[in-house]
Image: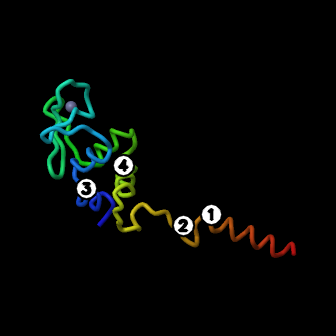
């Protein structure tokens, strides 16, 4: 399971709205994507839909818009804020032995060794 799946499976748009302080009335909230006086964005179990501007998406879209961050950052934020553990392999940067960084480090330590 990757981060996006883990987040979508564990957190509903409603939970996101409650957690981040969005006013929910009868499953409706004021749209995050367009200005409006009467809430027309409906929250479903696994997605949202705005009857005003037709915008739809999932919790990562909501949080991404709310905090002006990318969907990936939003997914990471939700995972962090809601304490969701996910497959850590996702998005993790692991330099291989032959990576540029590893080679440079190795060269440096060899130099140091020779200098001693
Ligand atoms: Zn809208």
Q: Earlier in the sequence, mark 1 or mark 3?
A: 3
Q: How many C-alpha atoms fall within 10 Å of the one at disc 4: few (<14), some, or many (≥20)?
A: many
Residue position for label 4: 74
Viewport quadrant of the N terminus: bottom left
Distance (Cα) linking label 2 and label 1: 8 Å
For the residue labelled by badge 1, is the local secondary structure a helix, a strand or a loop?
helix
Residue position for label 2: 95
Q: How many C-alpha atoms fall within 10 Å of the one at disc 2: few (<14), some, or many (≥20)?
A: few
Where on the picture, by quarter, is residue 9? bottom left
Q: Earlier in the sequence, mark 2 or mark 4?
A: 4
Q: Earlier in the sequence, mark 4 or mark 1?
A: 4
Q: Earlier in the sequence, mark 2 or mark 1?
A: 2
Distance (Cα) linking label 2 and label 4: 25 Å
Front position among marks 3 and 4: 3
Distance (Cα) linking label 2 and label 3: 32 Å
For the residue labelled by badge 2, is the local secondary structure a helix, a strand or a loop?
loop
Residue 103 against residue 66 in the figure, above or below: below
* Protein image colouring: rainbow
Q: Nearer the viewer, residue 64 or 22?
A: 22
For the residue labelled by badge 3, is the local secondary structure a helix, a strand or a loop?
loop
Residue position for label 1: 101
Q: Do labels 2 and 4 touch, CB within 8 Å?
A: no
Q: Is residue 55 left or right of residue 21?
A: left
Q: Do labels 2 and 1 touch, CB within 8 Å?
A: yes
> Which residue occupies 61% across, 63% down?
100
């Amino acid at each position: 399971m990757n981060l996006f799946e883990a987040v979508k499976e564990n957190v509903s748009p409603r939970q996101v709205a409650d957690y981040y302080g969005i006013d929910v009335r009868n499953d409706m909230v004021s749209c995050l994507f367009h200005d409006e006086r009467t809430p027309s964005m409906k929250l479903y179990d696994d997605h949202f839909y705005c009857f005003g501007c037709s915008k739809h998406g999932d919790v990562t879209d909501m949080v991404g818009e709310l905090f002006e961050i990318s969907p990936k950052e939003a997914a990471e934020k939700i995972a962090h804020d809601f304490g969701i553990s996910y497959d850590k392999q996702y998005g993790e940067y692991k330099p291989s032995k032959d990576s540029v960084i590893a080679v440079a480090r190795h060269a440096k330590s060899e130099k140091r060794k020779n200098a001693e």
